[in-house]
Image (tube, rainbow, N blue to C red):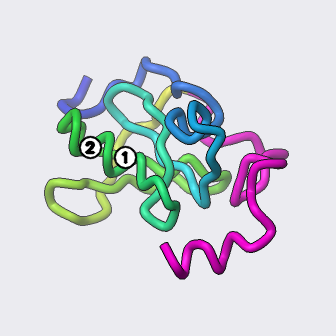
């Protein structure tokens, strides 16, 4: 394992763990490259991926969106290259973004602008 990356650990689920616990919703998803935790991006109200970094110090997150494979380094504040992580490498394509289906308010854009 390269420090900060664990290529064997699977993602924690198919959606943001904290948003799921709170019946919330997210815009985009991010995956911790060290422990597999799935959190929502900073465009989301919860900003749970950043909160995960703040509470754990796990510095690398990878996009968990279909067709995206970039990594973000929270310490240096930049995109970086990283290894291929254990599958699955994105949320299910059948799950919308924002998501999950049925929990996104119809006025979600206005809520984010206010938030």
- Image quadrant occupied by the N terminus: top left
- Residue 3 as seen in the image, left or right of residue 32: left
Q: Position of residue 28 (x, y in %)?
A: 58, 57
- Mark 2: secondary structure: helix
Of the pair 56 and 112, the residue shown nearer to us? 112
- Residue 34 as seen in the image, left or right of residue 84: left
Question: Does residue 52 lie above or below 28 as drawn?
Answer: above
Question: How would you rate the neighbour count of disc 2 (Cα within 10 Å): few for under 14, some for 14-19, many for 20 or more?
Answer: some
Question: Does residue 6 lie above or below 20 as drawn?
Answer: above
Q: Is residue 69 magenta?
A: no
Question: How would you rate the neighbour count of disc 1 (Cα within 10 Å): few for under 14, some for 14-19, many for 20 or more?
Answer: many
Q: Position of residue 4 (x, y in %)?
A: 23, 34
Residue bearing mark 2 = 53
Of the pair 71 and 38, the residue shown nearer to us? 38
Of the pair 70 and 64, the residue shown nearer to us? 64
Q: Residue at x 74, y 73 (%)?
A: 107
Mark identifier at residue 61 = 1
Answer with mark 2 or mark 1, whichever residue precedes in sequence: 2
- Residue 89 as seen in the image, left or right of residue 84: right
Q: Is residue 95 magenta?
A: yes
- Mark 1: secondary structure: strand
Q: Position of residue 27 (x, y in %)?
A: 61, 60
Q: Residue at x 76, y 49 (%)?
A: 103
For the residues labelled 2 and 1, say whether their Cβ atoms are less than 8 Å apart. Answer: yes
- The magenta-colored residue range is 87-115
Mainly helix, strand or loop, the magenta region?
Answer: loop
């Amino acid at each position: 394992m390269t420090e900060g990356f664990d290529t064997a650990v699977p993602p924690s689920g198919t959606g943001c763990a904290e948003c799921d616990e709170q019946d919330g919703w997210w815009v985009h998803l991010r995956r911790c490259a060290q422990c597999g935790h799935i959190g929502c991006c900073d465009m989301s109200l919860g900003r749970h991926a950043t909160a995960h970094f703040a509470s754990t110090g796990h510095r690398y997150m990878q996009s968990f969106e279909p067709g995206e494979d970039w990594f973000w380094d929270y310490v240096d504040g930049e995109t970086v290259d990283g290894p291929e992580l254990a599958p699955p490498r994105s949320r299910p394509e059948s799950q919308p973004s924002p998501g999950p289906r049925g929990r996104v308010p119809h006025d979600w854009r206005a809520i984010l602008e206010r938030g």
